[in-house]
Image (cartoon, coloured by chain):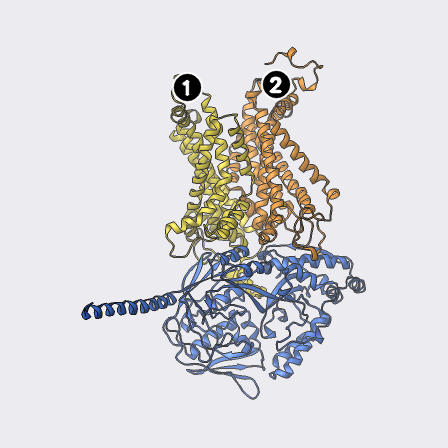
Amino acid sequence: MKSSVKSLLVTAIAGAVFTAGYGTAWAQQSAAKDSVVVVATVGEPSTLDPVGVTADLVSIITQHVFETLYTFDKEWKVMPLLASGMPVLSADSKTFTIPLRSGVKFQDGTTMTADDVVASLTRWTQVSPRGKTTTSAIESITAKDANTVVIALKTPFAPLASLLAMNNGAAAIMPKSVIDGTNPLKALVGTGPYKILEHKPDQYIRLIRFDDYVSPQGAANGYGGQRVAKIKEIRFVPVPNATTRVEGMVAGQYQFADSLPAEMLPRLKDAKGVTPIVVKPFGFPLMIMNSRAGVMTNQGVRQAVLAALGPKDMLLAAFGDPGFFALEGSIYAPGTAFYDKDSAKNYNQNNPKKAGEMLKAAGYKGEPVRILTSTQYDFLYKMSLVAQAQLEQAGFKVDLQVLDWATLMQKRGEDKAWDAFFTYHTFVPEPSLITFINPAYPGWWDTPEKSAALTAFNTDMNPVSRKAKWVKLQELFYTQVPTIKVGEFYNLAASSDKLKGYVPMPWPFFWNAEIAN
Amino acid sequence: MANPSATKSRKPGFLDSRSPTALLLRQLGRRPLTLIAAGLLTAVVVIALLSPWLTPYDPMKMDILHRLKPPTAAHWLGTDEFGRDVLARVMLGARLSLLVSFLVVAFATVMGTILGLVGGYVRPLDGILMRFTDALMAFPDILLAIAFMAALGPSLFNVVLALGVVYTPRVARVVRAATLVIRELPFVEAATALGVSTPRIIRVHVLPNLMSPIIVQSTFIFAFAILTEAALSFLGVGVPPTTPTWGNMIAGAQQYIRQADWLILFPGFAIVLTVLALQMVGDGLRDALDPRLQKVT
Amino acid sequence: MFTYILRRLVGMVLVMLIVAAVIFVIARVIPGDPAAVMLGSAATPEDVAALRTRLGLDQPFLAQFLIYLGQIATFDLGESIFLARPVTQALAERAELTSFLTMMSVGIAVAIGVPIGIVSAVKRGRLVDQGTVALAMLAASVPSFWIGLTLIRYLAVDLHWFPVAGYGPPDASLAERLRHLVLPAIALGIPNSALILRFTRTSMLDVMNEDYVRTARAKGLPPLTVILKHALRNALIPILTIIGLTTAVMIAGAIVTETVFGLPGVGNLVVSAVLRRDYPVIQGALLVVSGLYVLINLAVDLLYAVVDPRVRY
């Protein structure tokens, strides 16, 4: 063939290959750039303002949009996020100085300054259930300069850093301009890697990449470190029916599904393209008793409850698969900083006979014990049925009331209306964050010994001696028995095999993750 | 009509008489399907009534180690997620589902008949009563039931109340329409002219003639009540799951649809069989009681 | 004729007033507190009380009722506590789905019920007839949620012919959306087709016994012409009215079906509203749905009146 034609042909072929190669790369890139991840959640969140509520569902979504000063690394230690370093404590531990990063952008285009932080933190102390626990300890919150915030404390307060790092009831940082006292926010503007694109209740919440996001430095570590929004859009879809969440995953309709029934693990293992994820630690179920009014004010009766219950059967009925629970009496599981075995030795007695004797000794006259439960959380409902059977075996008279969640929430606030209720607590890294430690929380554990122990625990800034103070609290927990810890349980979630770079944590997050083709 | 002497050579008995019951039974006899359905229903009712003595195991006894076992010789219908025997629970469920529906029918029939009679007889009240029943019928039955259940809380009594109120208007309308017709019939007019008191007229003349439409309505309301109770339980606003009904058994078994589908299948079959039987009996009764067909006998 | 319509309209207004009162009482008697649900498990009673005041939930009942009546008169159904938007908007957003679902179910029910009903009537007494009547009763005995669960399991999960749940992504086309409604429409349509089938059959049987049909047959007209041109046309009116009433029934059936298939329609909204104690939505949705019922019944009655002069009394 003539050389000119040949060279033309070669050029043409080269050109085609070149374009094809680049073209596919471009296509893949733009596919990655335009990628959508659909996440099936347990329902519709009550709000998208992370400050006022502690619901897990709200924090899972809002943690992508809002950020806090600090956060937790993979060992659940506090690390900086919007702060530029760990807080500096004065010698008497009453001044808490927080250095801020500079140049952090809000989603409305403005830059974060200390004034925004002060306004956000002030609102947090007024509106957040966690923030409100600080009112007795915090004297003032002020901006020392554009990049430094100072919190003056009345007494040393050890939990402060952890409270600032929590992502629910969160001390989220927002522009001063959207804050209106304790009223709802004027706009949902944060500093996070994603911003809210569209919210259609009961259909979807669309979060889209915030292009001007300023990420913290350092390797990704737990919730902290570098955050890169590789996925373009995260779409949270409320799917209240658990079976539908599972089937939707298997059918490829969702790329991630949260809170799945433990029973469905085999289904997920067999399904192609889907990987089940067991999230450990996750939480612990509780049977909270009423220490303020009714038959449970009698400590002997509460101790009898502890003796009567056999957590193994309760957990087996609730979760089915032993891989999803552990019989652990210590409030914090082995491997965590606050684990202690000895103070939890009263756990798992499973002795109805002994319980019967303790009941007589306590002077129990057969008053019906009103236990509230709900089918809203299937595992709680199931374990309450087993508990009822075990308590009745010991000689308790049980009135099990199955309510819908809304009614249960309302009733548990009325001290004359119940004697015990079932709920669960998600893992929290800081003990002061546990709900029943707070004397204002339903159950109302408020004895002089406990108050003293709690104050001692909260004002001790030394981690080692603090642990000893926690052990003292746990001893009180197992002698005064305000609440029964049933055990540990783990969460089952599922992710598509196409979702790469996802790091399993309670409150799943999707920065740094991407969809492969 | 058949030649009397050519039919049977036995002595004429009750079934050959002209009493309404005999007529009815003769009509039913011509419909074997209806009789089979009626037999099935009777069996279900008997099982329901005798279930405390018939159940092979205690329906509430948990045996966690043997949970979710498929049907075997030991447990004919398998075990549920707590290890409880499914056959025992289906029987106990029969008791409750039928009890709820029966009470609903009783409530609706009594209240509906009273309302219908008042509306049919007391002219000034008729208008407002009919507006009231219109208002109640304006709600889809399940919607009203959900709202009631949410307002009153989940319990067997409240389910009965909610569904009873929902179905009362239907009976009331039928009774009112029938009353208006019966009032104008010659023998009632004659009784009034003779000075018979109204309550007696109602008791002796009107009510017996209302029986047929009421009975037919009742069978259908019974069927609706079973289906609606199942739907309410499915949505989570029915009888609390501590006491098993067929409906809440299915609701609780949803998540086991793959590994233990017998948990849905058996209560489901129970519902289908009972409702089917009820419909067949209702249809058969309606045909048998149809005045047009009675002339042919 | 005019006075008849006027009288019916006045009656309708009265009915709706009673309906509104009943709805209000029910919604207020419901225990459980929307404020407690919204704030989550860790909220203290003080937080809850503060939210109640902010939402206006602590005003006396009578005041709340009068406000409520006034609002209805101006078509203002209030604002959803949970969704923070007007109830009318929340309903409007979901109306499309529920209307499509209802229309498709009615379509399926009619497509199955009417032809088979006609065939059954024509072949009266024969095996075909008895079989279809029995099948129809069977179809009406199965709870629609069971049908739905079964359809999902086999047609969506195993065969992937249809999506498992939901109404499709935000940018879905109309065809895509309708595809999400196919299984729910079947689940809803089958039990109701039984009703339409039985009614068509009865209606046709009544008509076929009429003199003019026998005359047509005697005249030697082909059977198909007799059925379609003479019998069906006259049987159509009662059939149409039952279709109208079935539509109303479907709206109720949509509640359960939407829950099974996770469809964000009006029915699902009502159930969620009850579980979340969202009073304004419960009231508004009940009002709108019962209003629709009343309107459909009115239309059916008027249709009867138009067709049958004997009805106007």
Are the residues at dot 1 and dot 2 in contact (C-beta closer than 8 Å)?
Answer: no
- Camera sees residue B164: no
Q: In which quarter of the image is the C terminus of chain A?
A: bottom left
Q: Estimate the x, y position of residue B80 in percent, counting from the top left.
A: 66, 52
What color was chain A assigned in the picture?
A: blue
Q: Estimate the x, y position of residue A381 in percent, counting from the top left.
A: 63, 57
Instruction: Give above or below for A246 relative to B92.
Output: below
Q: What residue did someone put label 2 on? A: B191
Name which residue lies at 55% across and 47% down.
B146
The answer to whether residue C296 is left or right of residue B59 is left
The answer to whether residue B190 is left or right of residue C56 is right
Determine the chain carrying the residue at label 1: C
Same subunit, labels 1 and 2: the answer reads no
Name which residue lies at 63% across and 83% down.
A464
Say what amino acid the circle numbered 1 marks: Arg
Indicate which label's residue lies in the foreground, 1 or 2.
1
Give the label on residue C95, or none: none
Q: What residue did someone put label 1 on? A: C217
Q: Residue furthest bottom?
A: A91
How crowded pointer 1 is (Cα within 10 Å; few <14, some 14-19, many 20+) is rated as some
What color was chain C assigned in the picture?
A: yellow
Q: In which quarter of the image is residue A383?
A: bottom right
Say what amino acid the circle numbered 2 marks: Ala
The answer to whether residue A294 is left or right of residue A375 is right
Q: Distance between the residues labelled 1 and 2?
A: 47 Å
Q: Nearer the viewer, residue B289 or B107?
A: B289
The chain in orange: B
How crowded pointer 2 is (Cα within 10 Å; few <14, some 14-19, many 20+) is rated as some
The kind of secondary structure element at disc 2 is helix
